[in-house]
Amino acid sequence: MKQLLLAAVLLTAATAGYGQCEKKTILSASKTDHLAADSSVERSDDGLITIEFDKTTFLVNPPNESPLTGKVDSLACNWPTPYIVGKTRMKVTLTNAQGEVQHFTVTIEGKAGKVTLLAVMDDQPDQKIRLIADKFEAKM
């Protein structure tokens, strides 16, 4: 009986974690760190940035700039504790207001009570952008 109950709990947790991957999600942060190749901070920009995404679309709303719109080219997602512990890895194609296209690898990871987003431009892997989420949740 205990094994059956444990299996049901694990299945429910796995389904909840996968369910997060199917929903539109929003991540917001009050600071953007620009990192060097060795992951040291080159500069930080203050201002609210929001990122909204689901399994097909990706939208970046930076402070004082035009939004970047894009699509998710690939997605790997596993959140054993939804929005708290887990990892999402995406290949994203973004287009700015001038029509310029850029390709990124975006990793969102939650551990030890902190959710971090790391974006790496595919053609400039030495330059990274890091956000530490103030909020990470399903978009209502």
Image: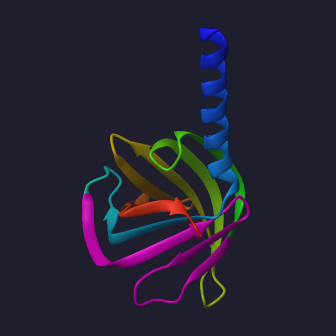
Query: What x and y, as percent, mark residue 125?
Result: 48, 56
Residue occupying image coordinates x 41% and y 63%: 135
- Res 34 → quadrant: bottom left
Residue occupying image coordinates x 61% and y 42%: 17
- Res 94 → quadrant: bottom right
Whether residue 133 is situated above or below residue 76 in the rendered picture: below
Quick one: 130 or 86, which is closer to the camera?
Answer: 86
Quick one: 119 or 2, which is closer to the camera?
Answer: 2
Query: What x and y, as percent, mark residue 116?
Result: 40, 53
> Is residue 124 something one can see in this rendering?
no
Quick one: 115 or 140, which is closer to the camera?
Answer: 140
- Label total for image: 0
Quick one: 28 or 73, which is closer to the camera?
Answer: 28
Q: Which residues lie in the magenta part?
A: 41-70
Colour scheme of the picture: rainbow
Decide whether the magenta segment is chiefly helix, strand or loop: strand
Q: Is residue 25 magenta?
A: no
Locate the N terminus by quadrant.
Answer: top right
Residue occupying image coordinates x 35% and y 64%: 134
The reply, left or right, for residue 55 in relation to residue 17 is right
Query: What x and y, as percent, mark residue 76?
Result: 65, 44
Residue occupying image coordinates x 66% and y 43%: 18
